[in-house]
Image (spheres, rainbow, N blue to C red):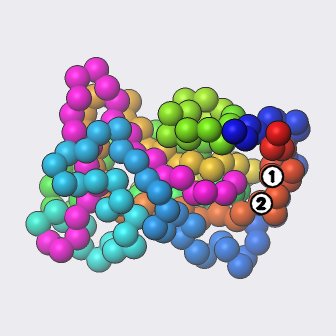
Amino acid sequence: MQYLIKIWKIPYVKPTSAFADANIALKKPTKLSSVFEQYNSTYALDGDRSDRSIHGDFICAQSDSVANQQSWWAVDLQNVYVINDVDIFGRTDCCYDAFANFDVEIILPTCTCNHWNNLEEGDKINCHYQETESQKITVTCPSNTIGRYVRIKRRDTVYLIICEVEVYGNPLNSLRESGWRQV
């Protein structure tokens, strides 16, 4: 089993234009806190944002309402990145309240073990709080925001609907550059 141990903080990393325009989250592994019917987490990273309604060909990721549980959606970027921006698209035909009252978090985990169970551990940066209902938001993270996971998490126990997520940033050249090392 491999573990990551933090050994220092990263200095400023200037964005590299080669990756700045590419959606680094596209087709990466995702997870929802719970799944409503067939609307699983992968629908939020299928690359299709042409029609953001459930009744068309495009389908959104949707969590179920579970008593005393905050709904969330997350993507594993499978590498450590400096995250610049996150674009999040909701439905355009209804349910605007399911796309409000959430945080956008960037998470750098403390280990490489069962990653979905360790989202509460590690360094977390809250890039944005979306209080009001919306159909689309663009989140600009603070400079030098470093992480492997992007999580969108409700602050209440209402279900969450996300139709598409795009993450923009630049990969670090190595774990050493991020201030982490494998042991």
Write down the residue under mark 2: 172
Q: Is residue 94 above or below residue 3?
A: below
Write down the residue under mark 1: 175
Q: Which residues are magenta?
A: 56-80
Instruction: Report the disc number at residue 183.
Output: none
Measured from the top left, where is residue 90 in percent x and y? 30, 57
- Residue shown at the point (39%, 73%) measured from the top left: 47
Would residue 153 appear left or right of 171 to someone viewing this image? Answer: left
- Residue shown at the point (22%, 64%) measured from the top left: 59
Q: Residue furthest front?
A: 1
Element type at mark 1: helix
- What amino acid type is highlighted by mark number 2? Leu
Separation of residues labelled 1 and 2 (CA atoms): 7 Å
- Residue shown at the point (82%, 39%) measured from the top left: 183
Measured from the top left, where is residue 136 in percent x and y? 36, 59
Q: Is residue 20 above or below residue 40?
A: below
Query: Are dots 1 and 2 in contact, CB under 8 Å?
Result: yes
Would residue 84 appear left or right of 120 to someone viewing this image? Answer: right
Q: Nearer the viewer, residue 155 or 2?
A: 2
Q: Quadrant of the N terminus?
A: top right
Residue 42: image quadrant is bottom left
